[in-house]
Image (spheres, grey):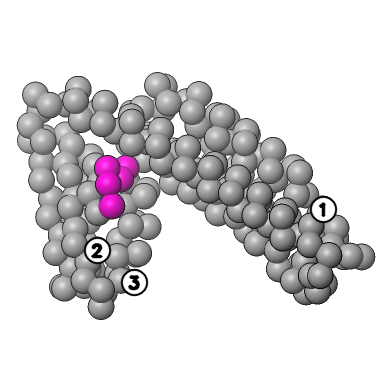
């Protein structure tokens, strides 16, 4: 039996929400190779079989031969690095765009608060995505090789969180949304990597 499998799916437009749910579930057990192709541990495919997936979604699981394990792990490493980098790049873009919008003189106070909250939600979401990536890395046993990539991403997110903590909009201080529990869940020791 193979250790790694591809999960390939095609979601019709009418079932777009199902595609979003499927992607969110796969984030915790594998890494995306391209739009609708994921690499997972074969043992994880048993979990997928238990998901109640819309029958209009065409989902296939294709096992790799054991002899291809080294190549598969190279693909996984590249994919995880791309995904982790995308998390911090996305957060950087949101921070940059909202900074530009917050610099405008014609924003109403409510719009300012919305932008600040958007930034803080982006930080919390980034922690969540990074945590999912770490869980998947653990299942692939790649945390030793990609630990520095995880640590750099965690540090980048933490830097944004620190910069946004207690951000003041007008006369209102907006509390950060990233909770200690989310951060503690990120690593087993309770500290950020």
Q: Which residue is mark 2?
A: 51
Say which residue appears at 62% left-offset and 41% top-offset. 157
Q: Which residue is mark 3?
A: 17
- Within the magenta stretch, is there residue 32? yes
Residue 30 versus residue 149 in the image, above or below: below
Left/right placement of residue 152 relative to residue 135 reads right
Circle nearer the N terminus (2, 3): 3
| Front residue of 97 and 63 | 97
Task: Confirm whether residue 46 shows in the render.
Answer: no
| Front residue of 162 and 192 | 162
Circle nearer the N terminus (3, 1): 3
Majority secondary structure in the magenta region: strand
Image coordinates of residue 77 in percent, x first then y, are 33, 29
Q: Which residue is mark 1?
A: 166
**Residue mark closest to the camera, 2 vs 1:** 1
Task: Confirm whether residue 7 shows in the render.
Answer: yes
Q: Give the spatial CA distance, label 2 vs label 1.
A: 41 Å
Say which residue appears at 58% left-offset and 36% top-offset. 154
Left/right placement of residue 134 relative to residue 26 reads right
**Residue mark closest to the camera, 2 vs 3:** 3
Left/right placement of residue 182 relative to residue 112 reads left
The number of numbered badges drawn on the structure is 3
Circle nearer the N terminus (2, 1): 2
Magenta segment:
30-35
Say which residue appears at 79% left-offset and 57% top-offset. 103
To which quarter of the image does residue 140 belong?
A: top left
Image coordinates of residue 116 in percent, x first then y, are 73, 60
């Amino acid at each position: 039996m193979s250790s790694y499998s591809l999960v390939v799916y095609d979601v019709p437009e009418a079932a777009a929400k199902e595609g979003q749910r499927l992607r969110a579930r796969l984030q915790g057990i594998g890494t995306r190779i391209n739009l609708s192709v994921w690499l997972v541990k074969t043992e994880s495919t048993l979990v997928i079989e238990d998901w109640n997936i819309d029958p209009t979604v065409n989902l296939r699981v294709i096992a790799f031969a054991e002899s291809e394990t080294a190549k598969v792990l190279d693909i996984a490493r590249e994919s995880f690095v791309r995904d982790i980098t995308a998390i911090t790049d996305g957060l950087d873009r949101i921070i940059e765009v909202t900074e530009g919008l917050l610099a405008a003189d014609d924003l109403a106070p409510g719009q300012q608060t919305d932008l600040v909250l958007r930034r803080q939600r982006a930080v919390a979401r980034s922690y969540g995505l990074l945590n999912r990536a770490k869980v998947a890395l653990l299942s692939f046993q790649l945390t030793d090789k990609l630990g520095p990539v995880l640590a750099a991403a965690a540090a980048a997110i933490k830097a944004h969180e620190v910069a946004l903590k207690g951000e003041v909009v007008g006369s209102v201080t907006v509390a950060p949304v990233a909770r200690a529990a989310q951060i503690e869940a990120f690593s087993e020791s309770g500290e950020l990597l």
